[in-house]
Amino acid sequence: WSSVRMWLGAAGFWNLAMFLLLVALQRLLFLVESFILASWVDAKAVRDVEDWTYMRRLIAVVSACCGSFVLLYWAAGRTSISASRELHSEVVLRLLRAPIDRFFDRQPLGRLINRLSFDMRQLDSAIAYCMVMLVAFCCGFLLTQGYILSMAPRAVALGVLPIYAVIFFYIYLYRGTAVPLVFRSKLSLSAVQDLQGTANSTCVSIRANGMRQDFMAKHNHYSASVMRCQYLIFHVAKAWVQSRVALCYCVLTVLFVLAGLWTNLAMGTLANVISLSFMALSEFEAISVIFSNCINVLNALQRLARFFDIPQEAPMEQEGDPRMRLSVTVDRGDLAQFELAEGPEAAPEDQEASPVVLMAAGSAILQSSKDGKTLEFLEGCGLRDLAPESDKLPPVDEHLQIVAVNSASGNARRMAQELRTPSPGGVWLDLWQSRHAGGVRVQIEDLVAGYGGDPGVLRGLSLDVPARAKVGLVGRSSCGKTTTLLCILRILEPRAGRVVLGGLDTSTWGLRSLRSVVGLAPQEPALFEGSWRHNVDPFGELPDGRIWEAVESAGLLPYVRTLPRGLDTEIARDGSSVSFGQRQLLSLARMVARQPPVLLLDECCSCAADPRAQEAVRAAVAERFPLSTVIMVARGAETLRLLDRVVVLDNGVVLEQATAREALEAEHGILPSFVKTERP
């Protein structure tokens, strides 16, 4: 019943109200049609009547009945689609937010998708028809039997009530038998499908180990169980209940006929009572078949309801979430008229690195930071001073610094020139909190994490990564490198310990805030359906120049230029037009364009077979993330030279760490011996 309530809630109150109203109207019109025919016969038997009057009434009622029938199926379809859409959206959302360590590592993804698609298809195709027939039968049964009992003498009406009780008792027994059989059939069918999938994937091993007969015996056992259950449901149980209900209806009909003759009931009304009684019997025979299908639908609905109990990730937003960065786009015409002035410590021999000041209306608003990589607001100035007339700037309480203007980043002078250049279009600004503009420090403290029921991949790992540092994780397979990255991003929730970014414990953050700060280029990158531009900038917020620079930084520019529509060329839906190496380079380009404060790279420097592409990737990692704190799974001596520190992991803990130069030049100890194994 909880599954039924879930479906009713998804269908919506007004859809259900409209459907039930049309069901009642359709059955009432059908009863009125029978009543008009009975009245016509009764009147014709006692006197000469004008037939055309009854014919007009009958035509009007039949037309209304046909119209209500069409509207009824429209309402049923609308209700079914609304409920299915709501359930599908909710189930997919819960699957997307299911944690790896408590769900996906215990559920085969292929089987999950197959069962979900099968259940949704069954729900879409059958529930509307089953719903119409069952509700219409129940409503019609109440109306017709109420009409029949009202025509019978009171003594007869009271006397047949036990027969109705017997009918409902037989239906109750049928339901109690059919429901377990349907569930047993579904479980056996699921076992058959699992065995078939196992046989397809491990056919060679089954034959080599002489397990074919054992698999065949299990397959035959579960197949026979499915056939027995189906035979019992659709033949034995159905015949059992239909024969007994038919006997009860025959007794009822005989009693009603005798009562009608005894009370001199009009012939037309008596014929109407008999026809309605037998019609209810024929409807019940059809409903007994539909009831079995309805149980299958309810079984599918119950399996869908289990998705609502899936454990979920942390909330996307938490009260008091820190806002480390903010991205806004301002119309060029709304910007203030800026003037560029040299700072008091200008160095003419190095104009690119010299301090700059941006002024508007004679007042200084922005100045370059001490390292010359960002623009910071002067005391008393804020984001609103950049575009006083713009309505696109959100209210901001934090003190911010500008780290990028359109495609200009990492250089205060270039960003200042971009702000004052009168070019058409909007101006995209990337702003970070001032306290984090110097980079985000990453601290991992006594981290314990794992998958499923294993004792843990990480077993008390502690690591301190300074702001803007580049740290490489090396180690043997399954030592915890990728698991560490997933814990920082909270795709995998730690069992103990914590991750601290910029002095803030990430366990208190909403996931949206955390993942706006942390970027990941995974070892198995995914493509988004759409163009190359969409894959670099999925949210469509970055300027064109920044996207092209990101593509060039990842070494994809020569290839993209050969495409017929450049960045706007659509990628094949199955990704067949993009190689695996290009996918990883595209994932890196996405990070270059995004410039996250904390960047996680999972062996992206070892993806490309082309040495020139590898060199482009290494150059991007070395030069294109001036403000980011980079933690990467490293491999190869050339990659290690890009790093500030190298950390060796073993059995989920830090075994040794040193600078990259020390690791490459040392001759003794665990670290140099391991680094040598990483050399190409």
Image (spheres, rainbow, N blue to C red):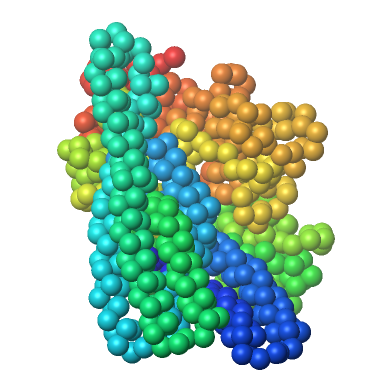
Left or right of residue 677, residue 586 in this image: right
What is the quadrant of the C terminus in the image? top left
Name the spot of residue 131 as percent of width and height, x first.
48, 64
Residue under the point 21% across and 31% down: 651
Residue under the point 30% across and 59% down: 244
Is residue 83 shown above or below 393? above
Name the spot of residue 266 as percent of width and height, x first.
52, 85
Q: Which of 269/645 is in front?
A: 269
Q: Which of 123/37 is in front?
A: 37
What is the quadrant of the N terminus in the image? bottom left
Name the spot of residue 345 as percent of width and height, x first.
60, 58
Q: Which of 231/128 is in front?
A: 231
Residue under the point 38% across and 82% down: 259
Q: Does the image show residue 3?
A: no
Residue under the point 42% across and 53% down: 289
Left or right of residue 601, residue 237 in this image: left
- The picture quadrant where one finds residue 15 is bottom right
Q: How many marks?
A: 0
Q: Does the image show residue 7?
A: yes
Name the spot of residue 484 as percent of width and height, x first.
32, 41
Is residue 413 shown above or below 398? above
Q: Which of 532/166 is in front?
A: 166
- The picture quadrant where one finds residue 472 is top left
Is residue 604 shown above or below 250? above
